Image (cartoon, rainbow, N blue to C red):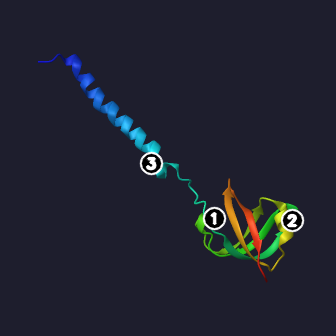
Amino acid sequence: MKPLKSYPVILALPLSLWFSVSALAQETAPEAKMPLVNTSTEMTEGVIRKIDAANKKITIRHGEIKNLDMPGMTMVFQVKDPAMLDTVKAGDKVKFRVEKDGGAFVITEIQSGSK
């Protein structure tokens, strides 16, 4: 009969292997590295309702924003670059890309279409 002192060693080996495999699986799992927000490059269509250049904001009635899982609505967005506001006017149909930055929704790209 083996002394009682060897049992902890026998139990420690399988446990250490289990922790190593578990850590490796977490480190290499693709879902572990995925961002919480889908960073789709798809642009959203909308119509500009109002431009507030002084506050770097734009109001757009838009369709579904898929990368943010947001339904269509009218809302105010901040713009990443205030120069974007010089390329559009109220009533323009646009395509735009928006990202969530902290608690704000920020337009990072906008393309003007026609009225």
Residue 97 - label = none
Figure quadrant of residue 87: bottom right
Element marked by disc 2: helix
- Distance between the Cα atoms at labels 2 and 1? 26 Å
- Distance between the Cα atoms at labels 3 and 2? 44 Å
Q: Quadrant of the C terminus?
A: bottom right
Query: In the rendered image, which residue does mark 2 sit on?
Result: 53
Element marked by disc 3: loop
Query: In the rendered image, which residue does mark 3 sit on?
Result: 29
Residue at left offset 80%, top offset 64%: 57
Does residue 22 appear left or right of residue 76 in this picture? left
Between 91 and 40, which is closer to the camera in this rendering?
A: 40
Residue 22 drawn at (x, y percent): 38, 40
Image depth: mark 2 or mark 1 in front: 1
What amino acid is at disc 1? Answer: Thr
Query: Is the residue 69 above or below the residue 12 in the image?
Result: below
Does residue 54 appear left or right of residue 64 in this picture? right
What amino acid is at disc 3? Answer: Ala
Q: Quadrant of the N terminus?
A: top left
Residue 43 drawn at (x, y percent): 66, 70
- Distance between the Cα atoms at labels 1 and 3? 24 Å
Residue 16 drawn at (x, y percent): 34, 31
| First of labels 1, 3 by sequence position | 3
Query: In the rendered image, which residue does mark 1 sit on?
Result: 41
Residue 101 drawn at (x, y percent): 69, 55
What amino acid is at disc 2? Answer: Ala
